[in-house]
Image (spheres, rainbow, N blue to C red):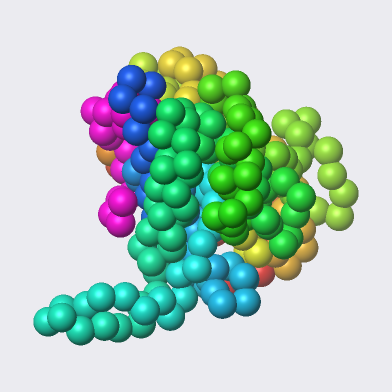
């Protein structure tokens, strides 16, 4: 799929889940071309394989969206593709990377037509190569796909127990909720959910793109507190999103930096962001 937007849709998500659980269909989508950390859908749904883009040297493409839902990567810079009027053109984008992965999955399915989506995902991710880590990250996920290695992994019958995507590993910069840290200024984010807590998700990323924390699937009428260490002269971006664009009723959100309230309230509609730190312009 070469499409996407910033808002999740419950009916769309349920359909993709049914594809996976009942219809044995593997769904694959481009993660987006925003060049920053955010969640775009359908690629960020649990039952979809999210595809990032790399250049000819295997490096993360500057435009490729980053998040914890990125699963794998494929070439997406200066890709020769069919174009209008029967011509050809070189094109950049995760929409160019996504067909590479779709092709690999098609080969896997031709090798083993009975392979389940869980087996496909497990073989695809376990055989991918990430030059930056032995696990996964927010830029390339598990790494760049390898068609031959993926089929070899599938031939071994590997399965990840039925989960479409494993829990992402902790990322650098995570601080426990007790706020332990040194040589930094403390940031506190407090959310008091309303009746529709599950509508809300929020996260914090550093200027280097590292995810400091990410929370979703919040329960109703609960208080959540996240504390992070903001390093001197750093610039961090806090983002919050509400799926139904009505914010949070009541006290909602409070952001405190250096013991001062920098935002308070629940009227943020679909969501917004706040840049925090001495290094922000």
Q: Tell me where residue 202 appears, x and y as whole percent.
A: 50, 40
Query: Residue 86's image quarter?
Result: bottom left
Q: Please check the rendered image and state whether residue 17 is part of the magenta-colored stretch, yes or no.
A: yes
Q: How many marks?
A: 0
**167 sits to left or right of 69:** right
- Identify which residue, 274 or 145, lies in the foreground: 145
Seen in the picture, residue 266 relative to 210 is either above or below; the reply is above
Of 221 and 147, which appears nearest the observer?
Answer: 147
Above or below for 81 versus 148: below
Instruction: Give coordinates of residue 223: x percent, y percent.
Output: 55, 21
Residue found at x 62% / y 70%? 58
Give the image location of residue 237, x and y in percent. Answer: 56, 56
- Could you tell me which residue is drawn at 54 percent across and 74 percent down? 55
Query: In percent of the image, x 36 and y 27: which residue is there?
Result: 24
- The relative height of residue 185 versus residue 234 in the rendered view (above or below) is above
* Extreme-right residue of the structure: 182
In this picture, residue 158 sits left or right of residue 197 = right
Q: Is residue 244 magenta?
A: no
The range drawn in magenta is 1-20
Horizontal arrangement in the rendering, residue 186 relative to residue 144 (left or right): right
Q: Horizontal and vertical percent for residue 207?
A: 63, 64
């Amino acid at each position: 799929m070469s499409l996407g937007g910033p808002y999740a849709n419950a009916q769309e998500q349920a359909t993709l889940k049914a594809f996976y659980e009942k219809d044995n269909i593997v769904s694959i989508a481009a993660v987006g071309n925003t060049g920053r950390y955010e969640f775009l859908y359908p690629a960020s749904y649990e039952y979809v394989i999210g595809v990032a883009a790399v250049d000819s040297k295997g490096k993360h493409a500057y435009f490729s969206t980053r998040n914890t839902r990125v699963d794998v990567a494929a070439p997406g810079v200066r890709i020769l593709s069919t174009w209008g009027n029967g011509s050809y053109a070189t094109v950049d984008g995760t929409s160019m990377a996504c067909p590479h992965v779709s092709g690999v999955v098609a080969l896997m399915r031709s090798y083993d037509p009975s392979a389940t989506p869980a087996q496909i995902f497990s073989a695809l991710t376990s055989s991918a190569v990430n030059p930056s880590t032995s696990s996964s990250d927010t830029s390339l996920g598990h790494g760049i796909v390898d068609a031959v290695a993926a089929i070899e992994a599938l031939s071994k019958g590997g399965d990840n127990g039925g989960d479409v995507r494993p829990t992402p590993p902790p990322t650098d910069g995570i601080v426990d909720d007790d706020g332990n840290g040194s040589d930094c200024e403390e940031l506190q984010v407090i959310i008091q959910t309303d009746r529709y807590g599950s509508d809300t998700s929020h996260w914090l990323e550093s200027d280097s793109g590292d995810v400091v924390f990410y929370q979703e699937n919040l329960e109703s009428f609960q208080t959540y507190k996240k504390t992070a260490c903001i390093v001197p002269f750093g610039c961090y971006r806090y983002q919050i999103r509400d799926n139904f664009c009505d914010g949070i009723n009541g006290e909602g959100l409070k952001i405190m930096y250096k013991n001062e309230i920098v935002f308070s309230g629940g009227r943020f509609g679909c969501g917004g962001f706040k840049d925090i730190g001495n290094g922000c312009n």
